[in-house]
Amino acid sequence: MAPLPKKRCPKAHQGNRRSHMARKAPALVLCSQCRSPKLAHQVCPTCGTYAGREVLKVKTEAKKG
């Protein structure tokens, strides 16, 4: 048989246990090339650079009209 707790744990204690599990906003930094916000240690989605060099070729959107 598996061991069981002596007493039932209150819901407040359950909330205290889970207090560190809250969602947090991702940390954004400014791109060194275009100054747009991006995720840290990721390629910039706007200009396609990482660590000061071009990694991706970014497609420019054609304007309608």
Image: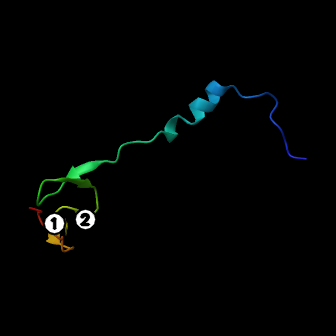
**Secondary structure beneath label 2:** loop
Judged left or right of residue 14, residue 43 is left
For the residue pair 18 and 59, the one nearer the viewer reads as 59
Residue at (13, 58) in percent of width and height: 32
Can you tell which quarter of the image residue 52 is in?
A: bottom left
Q: Is residue 10 above or below residue 29?
A: above
**Secondary structure beneath label 1:** loop
For the residue pair 63 and 2, the one nearer the viewer reads as 63
Q: Position of residue 58 (x, y in %)?
A: 18, 70
Judged left or right of residue 16, residue 9 is right
The mark lying in front, picked from 1 and 2, is 1
Q: Position of residue 10 (x, y in %)?
A: 69, 25
- Tags 1 and 2 touching, CB below 8 Å: no
Q: Amino acid at mark 1?
A: Glu
Extreme-left residue of the structure? 65
Judged left or right of residue 2, residue 9 is left
Residue at (91, 47) in percent of width and height: 1
Q: Is residue 48 above or below residue 11?
A: below
Extreme-front residue of the structure? 65
Extreme-right residue of the structure? 1
Q: Which mark is residue 21?
A: none
Residue at (65, 27) in percent of width and height: 11
Q: Amino acid at mark 2?
A: Val
For label 2, count other residues whose C-alpha is less than 10 Å away and answer few (under 14), some (14-19) or many (20+). Answer: some
Judged left or right of residue 20, residue 65 is left
The C terminus sits in image quarter? bottom left
Q: Position of residue 30 (x, y in %)?
A: 18, 52
Q: Which mark is residue 43?
A: 2
What kind of colouring is applied to the model shown? rainbow
* Residue pointed to by mark 1: 61
Give the mark nearer the N terminus: 1 vs 2.
2
Q: CA distance from mark 1 to mark 2?
A: 19 Å
